[in-house]
Amino acid sequence: MCKCKAYQNYWLLGHILMLVIRERRHQKNRGQNLSNKILLNAVKAFSPLKLRLGGSLQDMLIYDTGDSGQPCTPFVKNTSAMFGFSQGCLPLHRWDELNAFFQKSGAKIIFGLNALNGRVPMPDGSLGGPWNYTNAASFIRCTVNKGYDIHGWELGNELSGSGVGARIDADQYAADVINLKHIIDSTYQGNPSKPLVLAPGGFFDAAWFTELVSKTRAGQMDVITHHIYNLGPGVDDHLIEKILNPSYLDGEASTFSNLQGILKSAGTSTVAWVGEAGGAYNSGHHLVTDAFVFSFWYLDQLGMSSKYDTKSYCRQTLVGGNYGLLNTTTFEPNPDYYSALLWHRLMGTTVLSATFNGTNKIRTYAHCAKNSEGITLLLINLSGNNTNSIYVTSNGAQTQSARKEGRRFSHIPGLGEAAELTREEYHLTPKDGNLQSQQVLLNGKVLATDANGDIPKLEPMQVEGTKPITVGPYSIVFAHIPSFYAPACR
Ligand SMILES: *[C@@H]1O[C@H](CO)[C@@H](O)[C@H](O)[C@H]1NC(C)=O
Ligand SMILES: *[C@@H]1O[C@H](CO)[C@@H](O)[C@H](O)[C@H]1NC(C)=O
Ligand SMILES: *[C@@H]1O[C@H](CO)[C@@H](O)[C@H](O)[C@H]1NC(C)=O
Ligand SMILES: *[C@@H]1O[C@H](CO)[C@@H](O)[C@H](O)[C@H]1NC(C)=O
Ligand SMILES: *[C@@H]1O[C@H](CO)[C@@H](O)[C@H](O)[C@H]1NC(C)=O
Ligand SMILES: *[C@@H]1O[C@H](CO)[C@@H](O)[C@H](O)[C@H]1NC(C)=O
Ligand SMILES: *[C@@H]1O[C@H](CO)[C@@H](O)[C@H](O)[C@H]1NC(C)=O
């Protein structure tokens, strides 16, 4: 499972660009670029981080490739236009600057293409007619000619199902995805790296998604992407209660499970990604979606989506809004940045079945360890009072066939198999015990970049294998158990 961070929209595209420009000015005037360094280091630390460029305004964006016959002007606020802005244009020099940053930071790019070009209103209220891909095709061609590596091209944003702002029928969308695939195949002919085709980058709707899957053949759509804002609007004053409520968190499982079912029964090779998820829409909520407490939601989502075979999870946003992984002005990482980084480094791609017998306030996920022996557990304690501990044991493992996700184990009092050996633990708690803190402690020490803007090392503590794992009140623990033998991890 990989993590991928979404850029909120073209504000951010503009944001990054401004940064590039500001950096130059700094270098000329003051020779200083600290904020840039944090941003660069934050992206680099994932080696690689997937970045999605997209959002509402991607369907209002044209590319200055010379075929549009229109001047290349930026977005302008216009309350009567769809999404509140007039059409905007991406100048190629901006594209060059962005790609320079992507190359320097080693990011893998998913670019969201404008899927509304050429559409006309249909009698049923949707937009229809074939996608006019002329501008998109020339942009892709130009990107290839410049040698810029793109990990995936995604068609459209939130146009599936009943749509957000506008909607397109699944039948038409399938035809457009197939056209995108043709464009990519012909443009990348003879090119060793072929990018992924992703669609539709919208909210899950079982009938619509089923139709899209059934009308695209194997290999025409590599990834089906859906968006998640299951906590409701950011202005909600009860977000924290929702986040700490296990039943509320469980509510999203049905979406993952339905989508997994659709892909399975179609027998397709298309895989599922969460293409964008910020939890609470309309930009989240300051001191909730950018504070420690949000890691409960975020890590739980990463764990849950992986269980249902989701291959990537794009967090809204890297920078921007109230749900950024980085502070919008200083670029200092918020707690979720470190949660994402630990997940990225410790949790392998093979998901194991994990159960916790006891209170539902303990959330448990287990994967084969990443690039290492044994397994990694993610344990989340949503409870704020009383105390107990977790012993890890295996359960029925020898009798079970080593299905990919079939390893089942539970946590019971008693000594684990790995009693003699040590394990590595990473305990995350909020500064001063304040769930709404924007600073997180790792094993009791605050995580912050240093004077050079370097991302801190994330050092575990070594714990004797005989000791139970204690997950403090309102805290999160990653436990890497190198000596835990799980057949699925060989
Ligand atoms: C920032 O400036 C330093 C020199 O002061 C330079 O080494 C570094 O590469 C610059 N970082 C970026 C992101 O341009
Ligand atoms: C498609 O868009 C291009 C501009 O990118 C335009 O020149 C062309 O006329 C459009 N095609 C149709 C059929 O409208
Ligand atoms: C704003 O958008 C509306 C609807 O698309 C359009 O008719 C109008 O010309 C736009 N105004 C400006 C100033 O661009
Ligand atoms: C960004 O960091 C500064 C300094 O710590 C803080 O005052 C500000 O509230 C943060 N901004 C956001 C949006 O979290
Ligand atoms: C854990 O719970 C499951 C089902 O609730 C049960 O089958 C299993 O025996 C329990 N394991 C232990 C060790 O209590
Ligand atoms: C512990 O939490 C429960 C529910 O969250 C609450 O009813 C109980 O009063 C709390 N106990 C203490 C000692 O705070
Ligand atoms: C979770 O936190 C509560 C305190 O609220 C504590 O009593 C409990 O033991 C913790 N659970 C684990 C597994 O450590």
Image: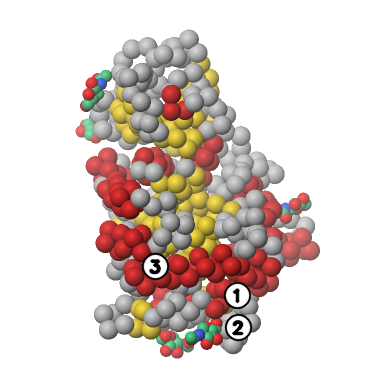
Give how far apart the Cα atoms at labels 3 and 2 are.
25 Å
For mark 1, what is the residue? 138
Q: Amino acid at mark 1?
A: Ser
What is the number of callouts on the image? Answer: 3
Rendered image: mark on residue 174: 3
Question: Front-most of 240 and 394?
Answer: 394
Say above or below: 113 vs 414.
below
The response on whether ligand 2 sits within 8 Å of label 2 is: yes
Q: Amino acid at mark 2?
A: Asp
Give how far apart the Cα atoms at labels 1 and 2 are.
8 Å
Q: Secondary structure at mark 1?
A: helix
Asked which quadrant contains residue 245, the reply is top left
Whether pointer 1 and pointer 2 mark residues with C-beta atoms closer than 8 Å, the reply is yes
For mark 2, what is the residue? 67
Q: Secondary structure at mark 3?
A: helix
Image quarter for ligand 3: bottom left
Q: Earlier in the sequence, mark 3 or mark 2?
A: 2
Q: Amino acid at mark 3?
A: Ala
| Residue 453 shows in the view | yes
